Image: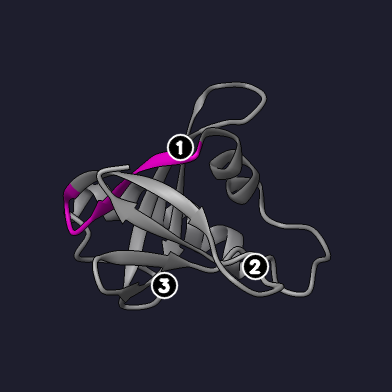
């Protein structure tokens, strides 16, 4: 419940504050992507870490056995718009190594 509420608040709070305010971790981005089936625009606030110029996102749904919807949408299209601190960038996606579903988003996708 708390997680769902925070994500809804962040969808509004992040763009209004130019990425400076969030209910989540200090490094939170807004992932803008199209739905895999609907093709409609979706916005998802996510925590991230950096590895060089790449952004690393972890596709986790807690203990749920399935990946979150944004992961499937990203795999379907391979690129997205990432908004960090009010700046928007097009990013391409690559799947991470290992058994997890994490991946890196490189610049200029």
- Residue 84 image point, x, y percent: 24, 57
Report the residue marked by disc 1.
33
Q: Position of residue 76 (x, y in %)?
A: 60, 35
Of residues 46 and 5, the one drawn nearer to the viewer in this rendering: 46
Of the two numbered discs 1 and 3 on the same chain, state the one appearing first in sequence: 3
Q: Is residue 11 above or below residue 50?
A: above
Q: Is residue 83 magenta?
A: yes
> Does dot 2 land on a helix, a strand or a loop?
loop
Q: Which residue is mark 2?
A: 60
Calculate the distance from the C-alpha at mark 2 to the C-alpha at mark 1. Answer: 17 Å
Q: Nearer the viewer, residue 17 or 96?
A: 96
Q: How is the rendered protein coloured?
A: one colour
Which stretch is magenta? 78-87
Whichever of callouts 3 and 2 sits on the residue coming sooner in the sequence is: 3
Residue 97 drawn at (x, y percent): 59, 71
Say what secondary structure mark 3 lies in: loop
The answer to whether residue 105 is magenta is no
Are circles 3 and 2 on residues that touch, CB within 8 Å?
Answer: no
The quarter in which the N terminus is drawn is: bottom right
């Amino acid at each position: 419940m708390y997680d769902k509420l925070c994500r809804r608040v962040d969808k509004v709070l992040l763009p209004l504050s130019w990425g400076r305010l969030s209910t989540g971790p200090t490094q939170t981005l807004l992932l803008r992507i199209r739905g895999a089936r609907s093709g409609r625009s979706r916005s998802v606030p996510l925590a991230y870490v950096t590895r060089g110029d790449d952004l690393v996102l972890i596709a986790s749904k807690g203990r749920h056995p399935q990946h979150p919807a944004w992961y499937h949408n990203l795999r379907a299209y391979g690129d997205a718009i990432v908004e960090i601190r009010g700046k928007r960038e097009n990013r391409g996606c690559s799947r991470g190594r290992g058994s997890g579903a994490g991946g890196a988003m490189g610049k200029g996708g």
